[in-house]
Image (tube, rainbow, N blue to C red):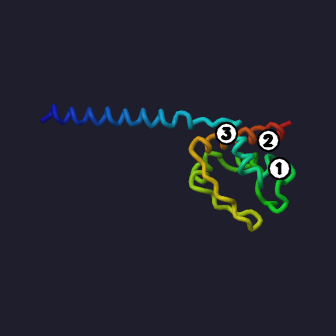
Amino acid sequence: MQKTSLVILLTGVVALGMWGISDYMARKGEAYGDVERGQSIAEQTCLRCHTKFEGDPLPDPNVTTAPALASFGQRWPLENLEEALAEGITVSHDNMTMPEFSFTSQSIADLLSYMESLTNEAKAKASK
């Protein structure tokens, strides 16, 4: 009886370990986004209404309250946007609802990496 319990326990531990390894390997590429891909995503989606930095000319004069992308990382941790981007952000600017975008885990990581680079650039400009 003890051997059977030990075998079952070990089998469970091994299975859990294998699941953890496979989950890690599946997400390994998503842990870090690519800034250039993120810039491309932002240009196709976000930068139609948002600016890169505070004070940049507005891309759409009808939208005046969309915050600059660089300001997001200064307001809160960018990781907080992951879930919202995955589920679809429901925010309005100037009585206009944001369009719904569909992002993969990798495109979210890419976009957040790009936004982080903008935040870092804005901080560097401000410290000069």
Specify which label sits upstream in the sequence, 3 or 2. 3
Specify which label sits upstream in the sequence, 1 or 3. 1
**Mark 1, secondary structure of its residue:** loop
Pair 1/3: label in front? 3
* Separation (CA) of disc 3 from disc 2: 14 Å
The residue located at (61%, 41%) in the rendering is 109
Q: Which residue is mark 3?
A: 113
Q: Which residue is mark 2?
A: 122
Q: Are marks 1 and 2 in contact (CB under 8 Å)?
A: yes
Viewer-closest of 103 and 71 = 103
Q: Position of residue 19 (x, y in %)?
A: 38, 36
Three-letter amino acid code of the residue under disc 1: Glu
User: Is residue 106 toward the left or the right of residue 59 in the image?
Assistant: left
* Separation (CA) of disc 1 from disc 3: 19 Å
Three-letter amino acid code of the residue under disc 3: Ser
Three-letter amino acid code of the residue under disc 2: Ala
Q: Which residue is mark 1?
A: 54
Q: Position of residue 90 (x, y in %)?
A: 64, 61
The residue located at (62%, 43%) in the rendering is 107
